[in-house]
């Protein structure tokens, strides 16, 4: 797993928690990151 992916997922989790729908966004974002690597 690429180094940047885990950090990006953590940052997205923090940001999306405030928005509410963070779980969906977390999986979606991590999926894209891992797919592109």
Image (cartoon, grey):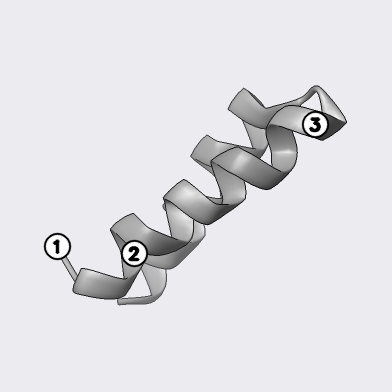
Q: Is residue 19 above or below residue 14?
A: above
Q: Which mark is residue 5?
A: 2
Q: Which mark is residue 19?
A: none
Residue 33 appears in which quarter of the rendering?
bottom left
Counting from the top left corner in percent of width and height, residue 26 is at: 55, 39
Residue 16 appears in which quarter of the rendering?
top right
Task: From the viewer's side, name the closer residue of 30 and 35.
Answer: 30
Counting from the top left corner in percent of width and height, residue 12 is at: 59, 50
Query: Label 3, on which residue?
Result: 18
Closer mark to the observer between disc 3 and disc 2: 3
Label tally: 3
Locate residue 31 relative to residue 18 in the image: left or right. left
At horizontal 77% and vertical 25% (from top left) the residue drawn is 21
Under circle 1, the secondary element is loop
Task: From the viewer's side, name the closer residue of 16 and 32.
Answer: 16
Residue 5 appears in which quarter of the rendering?
bottom left
Q: Categorize mark 2 by other alpha carbons within 10 Å: few (<14), some (14-19), many (20+).
A: some
Q: Categorize mark 3 by other alpha carbons within 10 Å: few (<14), some (14-19), many (20+).
A: few
Under circle 3, the secondary element is helix
* Cα distance in 3D space between marks 3 and 1: 27 Å
Query: Label 1, on which residue?
Result: 1
Counting from the top left corner in percent of width and height, residue 1 is at: 14, 62
Locate residue 19 relative to residue 14 in the image: left or right. right
Closer mark to the observer between disc 3 and disc 1: 3
Under circle 2, the secondary element is helix
Disc with the residue nearer the chain's start (3 vs 1): 1
């Amino acid at each position: 797993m690429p180094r940047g992916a885990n950090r990006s997922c953590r940052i997205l989790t923090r940001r999306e928690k405030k928005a509410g729908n963070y779980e969906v966004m977390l999986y979606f974002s991590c999926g894209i990151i891992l797919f592109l690597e």
